[in-house]
Amino acid sequence: MAARLTFRSAALALSLCTEPACAALQSAERVSPPAGAIAAMDAGDPVRALALTRTAGDACGARSATTDACTDLWLFIIQAALVADRPAEAETAARRLLAVVPADSEEAAGAQLLLAMVLQSRGRHVEAEPLLRAALNTALRVEGTDGVGVGMIAGRLGVVLIAFQRVAEAEARPRRAVAILRAEEHTSELQS
């Protein structure tokens, strides 16, 4: 069974996601980023990592019957492109990722979150807002009002609303996000 793109894995994908942290996102049914690309990221060379992974991503997309097999490559390309300060390439990979996940699914919400984050990094808040609202609606349906994905997305949406100076609408979102994430942190500490 293929690993699923979730709200948590979407957030992990934008962290410095290298072995073994990326292992949870990868499966035997998907094409992993090349070892050389992972080594380049580990060595602090995101430009080289991006070049190696971009080539693999193009080849994967061209030969794979289902582009879902390339999901891990798109995630890695997004991360490497952002670290390399190449937001246009991150956006292209995020759009490719969104195109291959099932619509109105947790995976789609994770991909919408990633694309919205890339667009926010480019100052394109108008384009990010509907993606965040759609992702939030899916997160609410999938996780309920106290889900971690709801918290992460609500916080991001609050930032977009502040950028539009819609402070009254934005005000409650970051507070709610912090409350959800604090509860999750407390639950994690109790389980440790």
Image (cartoon, rainbow, N blue to C red):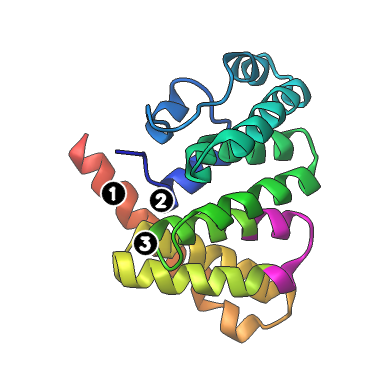
Badge 1 or badge 3: first in the primary sequence = 3
Badge 2 or badge 1: first in the primary sequence = 2
- Amino acid under label 3? Ile
Who's the residue at 77% across and 65% down the image?
124
In this view, the residue in front, 122 or 98, is: 98
The Cα–Cα distance between marks 2 and 1, rounded to whole angstroms, is 21 Å
- In the displayed structure, 2 sits above or below 161; it is above
Name the quadrant containing residue 176: bottom left
Q: Is residue 89 left or right of residue 171?
A: right
Q: Mark 3: which secondary structure?
A: helix
Q: Which residues are magenta?
A: 116-127
Q: Position of residue 5 (x, y in %)?
A: 43, 47
Rendered image: mark on residue 114: none
Which residue carries the number 2 mark?
6
Who's the residue at 47% across and 60% down the image?
108
The Cα–Cα distance between marks 2 and 3, rounded to whole angstroms, is 17 Å
Badge 2 or badge 3: first in the primary sequence = 2
Mark 2 surroundings within 10 Å by alpha-carbon count, few (fewer than 14), some (14 through 19), many (20 or more): many
Which residue carries the number 1 mark?
186
Question: Comparing marks 1 and 3, which lies closer to the viewer?
Answer: 3
